[in-house]
Amino acid sequence: MPRSSQPYRDERDLGHCRRWEYDDNMPLGLKRFQKAEALHFITFSCFHRLPFLQATEPKETFEAVLELIRARHQARVYAYVLMPEHVHLLMNEPPSVLLSQFLKALKQTTSRRLKGNRQQFWQERCFDANIRGDAARSEVIRYIHRNPVKRGLVASPGQYRWSSFNHYATGTPGVVEIESEWTAWLRLPLIAIKPR
């Protein structure tokens, strides 16, 4: 199986949970599997992995643009986290455009709003792994939400404002609509009950 369809993993297991690792030195010539009806675990970095997303304003801008592009293309975001120098997303393949087109629109729009006098805002490439099955999806969501804890930014995922964790914990909608059991429940049609 081509390397791009498998996540970069550190196989030194902690219990039964594999740790997902992102390698900044991505090899050239990777094949991207799109229209495969799988979720995609996507990571992309700020230019030279500089902490351009450190402050509150760029993170707020990124969330607003992510929701705008998500809604426009009817994409489903299952989890995300905004780190100071990179972004993790778990999402589906939008029905109206290729995933690569979605990411291009997301990165171009945020770059135009956030670049300022910098040479470049984002690294050109991104990491993309196909995720299939409930167990793999849950593992990636846990990895995404624990990233700020692993980096020492907070003591627990609930303390970090810039991720989808609090939506999963409480069902409270955030700036970005998250595809979860909470969201699915809200979409259920109300059943009219006729009084007797």
Image (spheres, grey):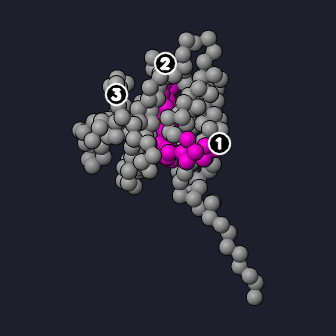
Residue farthest toward the bottom in the current orientation of the protein: 196
Return the mark for residue 72.
1
Task: Verify whether residue 83 appears in magenta.
Answer: yes
Considering depth in this image, is 50 or 121 the residue closer to the camera? 121
Nearest to viewer (mark 3 / mark 2): 3
Q: Quadrant of residue 149?
A: top left
SS state under label 1:
helix
Amino acid under disc 3: Gly
Dot 1, crowdedness within 10 Å: few (<14), some or many (≥20)?
Answer: few
Q: Residue at x 50, y 39 (%)?
A: 99
Measured Cα–Cα span from mark 1 to mark 3 = 30 Å
Q: From the image, which quarter does the C terminus lie in?
A: bottom right
Q: State how many labels appear.
A: 3
Residue located beneath label 2 in the image: 47
**Mark 2 and mark 1: span between their CA atoms?**
26 Å
Q: In the image, which residues are magenta? A: 71-97
Q: Nearer the viewer, mark 2 or mark 1?
A: 1
Determine which residue is flagged by label 3: 29
